[in-house]
Image (spheres, rainbow, N blue to C red):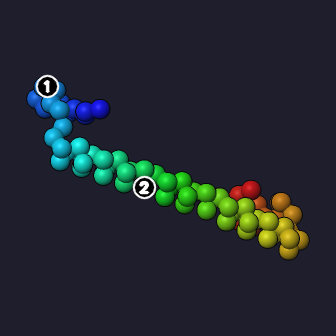
Amino acid sequence: MPRYKIENGIKIQFTAEEEIARDVEEKQAAIDQQARIDAETTATNKKTSGKQKLKDLGLDDDEIQALIGVW
């Protein structure tokens, strides 16, 4: 399906080069978005793991919250 752009209020179909460039941009955007999601997931998992390790050491929820400020 052809893609279009608007230049000076006129709808113009993408050239083959513009189509390729847009495809590359969209693929990179998807890769970047997945990288952000992966980073957030990793951070959440590490936070949960760290809290569990503190609990395994015998700290209770109040002590953990006082120590790191979150729960």
Q: For label 2, count other residues whose C-alpha is less than 10 Å away and answer few (under 14), some (14-19) or many (20+).
A: few
Kind of residue indicated by mark 1 = Gly
Where residue 27 appears, x then y in whole percent?
37, 51
Left or right placement of residue 52 versus residue 40 in this view: right
User: Does residue 30 sit above or below 53 in this rendering?
Assistant: above
Q: Which amino acid, by three-letter code, is at mark 2?
A: Asp
Closest to the observer: 60 or 12? 12
**Residue found at the far right of this picture:** 58
Q: Residue 11's spot in the image, x, y percent? A: 16, 26
Nearest the eye: 70 or 25: 25
Residue farthest to the left?
8
Residue that mark 2 sits on: 32
Residue placed at 85% from the left, 74% from the top?
A: 57
Occupied quadrant, residue 42: bottom right
Q: Are marks 2 and 1 in contact (CB under 8 Å)?
A: no
- x, y (%) of residue 23? 30, 47
Give the residue at x 18% y 44%: 16
* Percent x, y of residue 32: 42, 55
Query: What element does badge 2 sit on?
Result: helix
Q: Which sits in the foreground, 55 or 38?
A: 38
Q: In which quarter of the view is residue 1 placed? A: top left
Residue 66 visible in the current orientation: no
Q: Which mark is residue 21?
A: none
CA distance for labels 2 and 1: 31 Å
Apparent side of residue 26 relative to residue 55 in the rendered image (left or right): left
For the question of whether residue 19 can be seen, the reply is yes
Residue under pointer 1 = 9
- For the point 27% across and 46% down, which residue is it? 22
Q: Few, some or many C-alpha atoms within 10 Å of disc 1 (few <14, some 14-19, many ≥20)?
A: few
Task: Name the residue located 73 percent from the left edge and 61 percent from the top edge.
Answer: 48
At mark 1, the secondary structure is loop
Q: Is residue 66 above or below residue 25?
A: below
